[in-house]
Amino acid sequence: MSANEGTRAYDAVIVGGGHNGLVAAAYLARAGWSVLVLERLDHTGGAAVSTRPFAGVDARLSRYSYLVSLLPRKIVRDLGLDFRVRSRTISSYTPVERSGRPTGLLVGGGEQRTRAAFARLTGGDREYTAWQRFYGRTAQVAQRVFPTLTEPLPTRDELRRRIDDESAWRALFEEPLGVCVEETFADDLVRGVVLTDGLIGTFADAHDPSLDQNRCFLYHVIGGGTGAWDVPVGGMGALTDALAGAARAAGAVIATGHEAVRIDTGRDTAEVAYRTRDGEGAAAARYVLVNASPRELAALTGDPAPEPAEGAQLKVNMLLERLPRLRDPDADPREAFAGTFHIAEGYRQLATAHAQAAAGELPTAPPSEIYCHSLTDPTILGPELAGRGYQTLTLFGLHTPARLFDRDNDAVRDELLKSTLAQLDAHLAEPLADCLATDADGRPCIEAKTPLDLERDLRLPGGNIFHRALSWPYAGPGDGRWGVETRHDRVLLCGAGAVRGGGVSGVPGHNAAMAVLERG
Ligand SMILES: Cc1cc2nc3c(=O)[nH]c(=O)nc-3n(C[C@H](O)[C@H](O)[C@H](O)COP(=O)(O)OP(=O)(O)OC[C@H]3O[C@@H](n4cnc5c(N)ncnc54)[C@H](O)[C@@H]3O)c2cc1C
């Protein structure tokens, strides 16, 4: 497709070729609709992509998002995607120093091992029993909530009746998460491990009255009806490629290098003006589905901007020649790094880091979590690297809101990266720097992205990985039937900013497609 070729008409024009835009495109094209996807970058996928970030190095890293939980099997089946996930044998490992000695908590590898790991750390059975009861209840909530994500929005009362557990409802939907965490668990490290699921990409305290941490927690424990976080085989780009393939095979036109610059909308049709390297053009549609953020949507339609939505994470991608040895003599790096490796995420440490960042300072002990993709799925490494035992490492840092980088993004990124890696090094028997591979130019294979980098590269508002704070999975005022409706009849959201959006789920893409198919 080229610019300056007159205004063509489609049943649907989709603004953004992120994974959700592609899900919507594939559903609509399979239903026989003519579909055009406009993506400003020269590739599809948005925050769900694989890239080779290091010069001359054949390692295809999931550059931004890296684990899959919220993608319903139904979407994979409906669209006939050739896409698989693999479960992790270890759920998490958290190193800590107790009584001057390095130790840690390994969750996974079977019930007996996990029980023994809790006993080793806490000296008894109490915390493990509490853990099992707590996650048994979240699993029940998951089984009831997850299937509703791809149905029309339930009301709050309908969802509450469906969950049918008043104390779980209160703990997850009404009281700040910190209340339940403190009532249920006594050990600071165990409390911290539980709380982190409420803080991914979400700048909140355990007792934040906004309950942002509760919504984030909910989305982290309901995926697939179990809350398991799985490894996408081939990396996150494998999902995007499968989706783009499905959309194209069904007849959708995907135009990369096409940036939407304006949406004009009336009662019966809408028109999207776009810009390419060669010029400008326009496409008319019965419906426009916006995969870009709510902020971008407002800019395109000329509506007032929504409330600012700030991201708060640091993302670091690395390639190692070998996994580092650990100070904890009972921990095997091949297990510890296979799950989520928590650093400086004790409950009190998280509270301190949040308070420091809220006061405008970088946390002195930045919390983060780390995971090695290639231990579970080595296919992302070229044969030579895999043969030499190289491993990838992904680090996701918490509690560093975009505003902290305003003064000098490059300098603050460097400072934060240094202090984050120092927290990791404190638990290693050899410095991480000694294990880093080097690229074709002799530079260490490590890259870091701040919220401002993500805003620049992906147009995530304030670097927010979910486009805005996550929403409750029930209807709020003005949310419409599917949670994708906007104030314009012909314009819908089909991205993370919709109700029940956020994360690699395809859910808002599916729901926007269902909403317009219903209307016809
Ligand atoms: C560092 C990081 C780590 C994450 N980790 C995970 C994880 O492990 N698991 C998980 O489930 N989620 C994770 N997430 C969140 C998840 O990746 C996102 O919520 C999800 O990818 C959003 O998908 P989307 O398709 O709705 O939007 P996006 O991926 O943001 O795609 C939107 C697309 O719209 C395009 N666009 C924007 N404006 C225009 C315009 N004017 N014209 C044309 N195109 C436009 C953009 O270029 C982009 O391609 C992570 C996100 C980040 C950034």
Image (cartoon, rainbow, N blue to C red):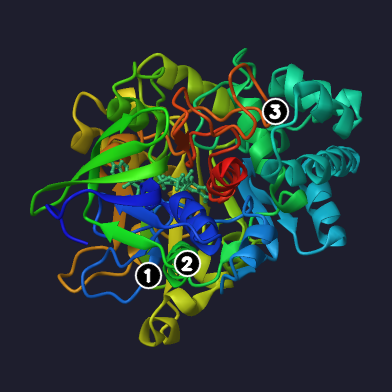
Q: Which residue is mark 1?
A: 60
User: From mark 2 to mark 1, how far is it between C-alphas?
Assistant: 7 Å
> CB of residue at label 2: within 8 Å of ligand 1?
no
Query: Residue placed farthest to the front in the image?
Result: 268
In-front residue for pair 107/314: 314
Assign the C terminus to one quadrant of the image: top right
Q: Nearer the viewer, mark 3 or mark 2?
A: 3
Q: Nearer the viewer, mark 3 or mark 1?
A: 3
> Of marks 2 and 1, which one's residue comes earlier in the chain?
1
Residue 228 at x, y percent in the picture: 70, 54
* Residue at the (86%, 38%) spot, across then down: 137
Is 375 on the left or on the right of 459, as rendered?
right
Name the element at disc 2. loop
Residue 260 at x, y percent in the picture: 25, 42
Q: Residues within 10 Å of mark 2 (few under 14, many from 20)?
A: many
> Of marks 3 and 2, which one's residue comes earlier in the chain?
2
Q: Are marks 2 and 1 in contact (CB under 8 Å)?
A: yes
